[in-house]
Image: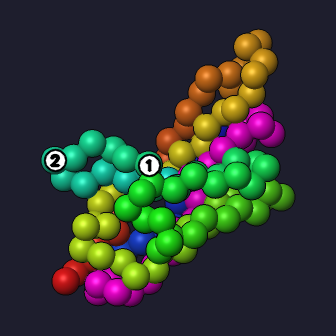
Amino acid sequence: VQLQASGGGLVQAGGSLSLSCTASGRFTSSNAMGWYRQAPGKQRELVAIITNGGITTYGDSVKGRFHISREKAKNSVIMQMNNLRPEDTAVYYCLARSLTLSSDHPDYGMDYWGGGTQVTVSS
C-alpha cells in the first residue's frame, strides 16, 4: 500500500486548508484512513480518522473545526481544516489502517503511513 498526500502549506490563524490522501495498491476493504500529526517536541497524535463505513473519530483539539470525508471509490480521504490556530502547526501524516478481523489476511494488524506534509499556521 502506498499513500500519496497533498495539500498543507502556510496560512494565517483563522484561515483554512485542506489535506488529501490517496491509497494505492492492494488493501483490505475493511479499513480506516485519516491523519495524525506531530509538532516539534511532541508525540504524534490523532487528528481525524474515518472508516470505510463512514464512522469518524476526531482529536479533541480539532472537533468542530476539522472535517474528514472519504471517497471510497478512489480510496482517498479529504480533511478540511477550518479556523486554524498556531497550535495546529505540525507535520501531518496520512494513515491507512487495516480493520480486517481475518488473521490470515496479509493486511491484518497493519498500519501504512504516508510521508508527512507540513502545515504552518502563523499568528
Label 1 CA crowd tier, 10 Å (few <14, some 14–19, many 20+): some
Label 2 CA crowd tier, 10 Å (few <14, some 14–19, many 20+): few
- Tell me how far mark 2 sits from mark 1, CA to CA: 16 Å
At x 69%, y 26%, the residue is 107
Label 1: which secondary element: strand
Quadrant location, the N terminus: top right
Q: Is residue 8 left or right of residue 86?
A: right
Residues rendered magenta in the picture = 11-34
Quadrant location, the C terminus: bottom left
Q: Amino acid at mark 1?
A: Leu
Q: Which mark is residue 41?
A: 2
* Above or below 44: residue 74: below
Q: Amino acid at mark 2?
A: Gly
Quadrant of residue 11 in the image?
Answer: bottom left
Query: Which residue in the protein does label 1 denote?
Result: 46
Q: How is the image coloured?
A: rainbow
Quadrant of residue 12 in the image?
Answer: bottom left
Picture mark count: 2
Residue at the far top in the pictured view: 104
At x 31%, y 67%, the residue is 88
Between tags 2 and 1, which lies in front?
Answer: 1
Q: Is residue 86 left or right of residue 24?
A: left
Label 2: which secondary element: loop
Of the residues under marks 2 and 1, which one precedes in the sequence? 2
Q: Nearer the viewer, residue 63 or 54?
A: 63
Q: Which mark is residue 87?
A: none
